[in-house]
Structure formats: C-alpha cells, structure tokens
Amino acid sequence: MLRLATRLLLYLLLLLGAAVFVLPFVWMVLTALKPLDQTLAQKQHWLPRRYEADLDGRRQEVRPGALVTEPAVWLVLHGAAQPVVVPAAAVRDGAWHPQSGAPVPVRVLKPVPATLAAPWQEITDLRGLARDVVPVSAISSAVAFRWENIPRSIDAMRHFGRYLANTLLLCVLNVLGTVLSSSIVAYGFARLEWRGRDVLFGLLLATMMIPFPVVMVPLYSLFRWLGWVGTLRPLWVGSFCAGAFNVFLLRQFFRTIPKDLSEAARIDGCSEWRIFWQIILPLCRPALVVVALFTFLGTWNDFLGPLIYLTDEHDFTLALGLEAMKMSRSGGTEWHYLMGASTLVILPVIALFLLAQRSFIEGIALTGSKT
Amino acid sequence: MTSGDRRRLGLGLAFVSPWLVGIAVFTCFPVGASLYYSFCDYDVLSKPVWVGWLNYQDMFSDQVFWQSVGNTFVFNLLALPLGMVTALALALLLNQPVRFRGVFRAIYYLPSLVPAVAGAMVWLWILNGRLGLLNQALVHLGLAHPPQWLTDPAWTKPSLALVSLWGCGNTVVIYLAALQGVPRSLLEAAMIDGASAWRRLVHVTLPAISPVIYFNLLIGIIGGLQVFSSAFVMMGGGGPERSVLFYAIYIYQNAFEYRHMGYASAMAWILCLLILVLTWLASRASRRLVHYQGD
C-alpha cells in the first residue's frame, strides 16, 4: 500500500490535472451566461453579476464603467453632450485646464471626493443613455446568470435549426450506412472461407494508410461532376461503402464468436444471410454500439468535409455554422454568444458520453489493443 | 476450382461487395486520379493539362511550401512528445489504486470528444491577448506583458500545442487499458527483488506497454502531419506571418482557394511519402525498443 504522503501527492496531482482539463468548459459556460460588457471588462470576474444603483431617480440595473480613485469633478465640457470625470486639480475658475492647450469652459455637475480607499465609479443604464458617478459602496452587486443568453446565442447563430437538422440527418445516415455496410463486409472477411479473402483483407488494411489529402481533390472533382457539390450527399454516400477501420474492428469481434454456432445453423439449413442477421449480429451488439457511437461523433465533429462541400449557408452543419458565426461578427466579437453556441454544440457530445461511457472507454481501449 | 469453391467465392464476394464498390470509387479511382493530377495543371473547371514534373519542381522553389513543412515539423516536435508524455503520466497516476478513477478518467477523456471547431472557439477566448482567462491570470500573478498567444508568431505554435494537449485524453485511456494489462507477477517479482518504483517503471512497465507506446507514436505522427482544424479555425489562413500555416492547410488553400488542384495533389503525394518514411523509421527504431509479449 502507498504511504500517506504519496497518496496525498497522488490525489493532489490528479485533482490539479482534472481542474486544468475542466477549466475550459467551466469558463465557456460562465462566459455564455454573462452580459456582453462583463466579457469585455479589463478585469473579469468568475461569475456573471448583476449591478444595481440609484440612477435617474430610481433603483435600476446599471453597467459599471471606469473607476475613480482620486478627487475629481463630474462635469460637462463646453460643447460636449456627455458628462465626464476630470481630476479635480485640473479644474479651476469654471474651466478645465488640460496639460497642453487652452482652458475649456465647463459646467460642473458635482464634485467627486474619491480616494484610493473609497473609490467612486462611473455607471450607465443598460441603454447607455443615463450616466452618473457614484461611490462604489452605493452599487450593489449579486451573482446573476443570464439564461436569456442561450436563446439569443441560437438567434446569433442565424440558421441554428437548419444546422441542427442537417447535422442530425448526416449523423443518422452515416451511422446507418456505416453500421450496416461495415458489419456485412466484416462478416464476409471474418466468418466465410473463400479464395482471395486474405489478399483482399490485406488490401483493406493497406488502404487505412492513405492520408485523406491524397483522395481529397479527385473526390471533389467527382462530386462536382455529379453535381453534388453544395448538397449534403458527398458527406454521407461513402458511409454505405464500409470504412476500412470499422470493418477491421468488427472483424476482430466477429472472430471471437465460436464457429460451431454458424455450423449448427448451416446444418439446420439456415441461409448465410440469416446466420449473419439473426445469429451473429445480435451477439455483436457491443461492437456495433462502439462503431455507431464513433461514427456519430465523427459526423457531429467533422469540419473539413462540410467546409469543402457545403456552399450555401442553409446547408451548413453545426460545426460549420459555428465557424461562420466567428466570421460574421460586426466590430467586436460577441464572446458571450459565441460561448453559448459552443456550449450548445458541445453539450450533446457530453450527454452522449455520459449515457454510453462504458462503450466509449471499451471502444477506445479496443482500438489501442489491436496492434 | 470445385463448384463448392466457386459458391463460397461468390458468397464471400457478395458479402464484401459494399467494400469492393467503396474501394473502387472512393479509393482506387481517387488515388489513380490524384497521381495523374499531380502531373497536371488542373483547376477543376477545365480539363487537366499534362505538365510533367513541374508541380514537384515548383515545390522545391516555393518558399511557402518549405515554411509549411517547417511549421508542421516544429509543431509536432513540440506537441507530440508533450502529448505522449503527459498522457502517459496521467495514465500512470490513474493506474494507482485511487478512488473515483472513473470520474477522473471521464474528466481527462471528455475534451478529446469535443468538436474541433467548438474547442477552437473556447481556446480563442481563453488565449485572447487582453481579455483571455490565461493572460488575466498571468497579469494577476504580476506578469506585466503576458505572451500574445494568438498574434505573436513566436507563440502561436506553443498555443496550438496547448490546445492539442487538452485533447490527449484519448491517449490516456489507451495507455490506461495497456497498463492494466501489465502482468502483475512481473511487477511483484521486481518488487521482491528490491527494485524501486522508478526502476519497476523503466524496466517492467514501460517495456510491457511498449507496443502501445509505439502504436500511439504512429497514430501521432500520421495525425500530426495532417493537423488542420484547430489551426484553421483559430488562426484562419496560416496565422500571423504564416507561423501556423501547416502542411494540410497549405494543401487545402492550394486546392480550394487558389484552385491549384494539380499542385495540391502533388503535395498530398509528398505527404504520403513523408508518412511512409516516418513510419518506416519508427518501425526500424521499434525493433530494438518494442517488446511483444511471447517473444
């Protein structure tokens, strides 16, 4: 057994690691629930807050602005519309004396007796119309999550519904196509004896070595020739032709099932298709679940494929829509909506993992152990 | 061939027919066409025109090509060892008799499932020069001028290595499965012989899982040479001073932005060659270092 100090160190390291891995998720969600100005603040707080103060004669929610830590004057410069805070030392005889240039006449609104120990702060109302400067102690603050940001993130993503529908459609088609075709093919390689089988299987393994960029250009020109660029078809048709890796995975699994089972069924006059469909396949449920899960995730997460083939915004997938959202910013980035949309894209993945954790872990371990 | 043989052959081919169609349409045809295009001037809109070795010659004099090769190598020399060592370290920690192992494993594993685009958005925000969480923390710790992770060419590669490190949970799970397969008898024998924990690790555990380390290295090399999404999403077309213009990004740009499909195909074949050479080197090195049980 480990000594106490070693155990403590072990848990400390594990917790530290876990904190680092979880932090990006936490920060994403917290940012998604903040108002815009709190994401752009020079010094940010962990939790979204709500500030209230007396402004315009009533208690209301306000946005805090610049902090004042030395005696100052709250005044309106001649010819200006908005009041500003100016250091008290620079205001004499009803005029502001800048460090260089002529004095500017001012209309003093009120003195701001701020110090480092008792700072004041500029505040504005939410529409940015009314302003004031008040002691920091007069501003109340409370933690407040802006749940309304979530529907607004969906709006900010423009065609969220279409993206979701496209992504789900692709996921369903790819999972269906992959599971069906890969299991049929894997059966042919795993449980039937025929001439040339091992040569073809060697070829299948060899194709796994070909990097995607090699086939990228000809596939694009093929799909272009078919008139499929700008449709979802290039992104799912191939899945019905059995992916090499999935065939490999399923074959390994199929081979673990005793041969006698098939022999007995054959003697009973069962057709090969029925043996596959009614006997072997139900026994391979765990492996099929693994293939389905990884295909679903692969489709949900795919970026390069949609980037190449989808041209119209209405056909975009969630991944592509999220990327487009970054591009379509006007002026500054709306980080709170971007994080809200990211949360929405990540959430189903996390939910799927929590639902099927065992299959994931076993599947991953399986891919590693087949070397 | 007897009629039985023929029947079995027909049946076998019938079962693997989806793959036969697939390999013809989605592998053989594109591989052949790509090889042909790599010797052509081709923009998809008009017919390819044979230009011989020109595309390959152009590569040698193309500064940007060499930059993309350099970027890809430097990034991988940074990210690959970092990821493999961190993953192994985390797996070794998790392999100890700890409580809540499943919870820790889930936490480490989850980021590797996150869609590349969404992960890129989160890290864009965290690494933001002025507003990002990381730099706010560094300023808080007293660093007046924290690195500009996304805009300083010297920092863009480490930034992306950090992002890829976040996704190393996949490898952690693979290592953990391998570690749990290390024969207990070997470790106990070493312990009885008085071997320290460090010596047990170096002389028993690591050799026992060396095939898996080798597997992760190969996967890492093949994947690392093709890094695309996070760099593309986070830094657009190559980042500041093209510092993260990786090989795969340059192929993509040539193919779909400049419409130099022939050049892109030639680059893809060089990539294929690079992968072959590197895996060959790795397999040669592995002969001395990797121990398969039962040898």
Image: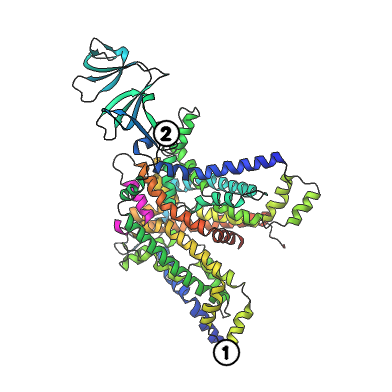
Identify which residue is drawn at 57% across, 43% down: A17
How many numbered circles are shown? 2
In the orientation shown, which residue stands out farthest toward the right? B193
- Seen in the picture, residue B113 relative to A225 is either above or below; the reply is above
In the orientation shown, which residue stands out farthest toward the top? A93
Q: Main secondary structure of the magenta part?
A: helix
How many other residues sit within 10 Å of disc 2, few (<14), some (14-19) or many (≥20)? Answer: some
Q: Quadrant of residue A44?
A: top left
- Range of magenta residues: A311-327
Q: How is the image coloured?
A: rainbow
Residue A317 magenta-drawn? yes
Quadrant housing the C terminus of chain A: bottom right
The disc labelled 1 sits on which kind of residue?
Thr
Q: Position of residue B198 (x, y in %)?
A: 72, 44
Residue A148 seen anywhere in this rendered image of the structure: yes
- Seen in the picture, residue A273 relative to A231 is either above or below; the reply is below
Q: Chain of mark 1?
A: B
- Seen in the picture, residue A119 relative to B173 is either above or below; the reply is above
Q: Position of residue B70 (x, y in %)?
A: 48, 46
Q: Secondary structure at mark 2?
A: loop
Label for residue B2?
A: 1
Decide which of B8, A5 is in the foreground and name it: A5
Label for residue A44?
A: 2
Residue A179 magenta-drawn? no
In the orientation shown, which residue stands out farthest toward the front? A58
**Are labels 1 and 2 assigned to the same chain?**
no
In the orientation shown, which residue stands out farthest toward the bottom? B3
How many other residues sit within 10 Å of disc 1, few (<14), some (14-19) or many (≥20)? Answer: few
Q: Nearer the viewer, mark 1 or mark 2?
A: 2
Q: Chain of mark 2?
A: A
Is B48 placed left or right of B147 in the picture? left
Q: Secondary structure at mark 1?
A: loop
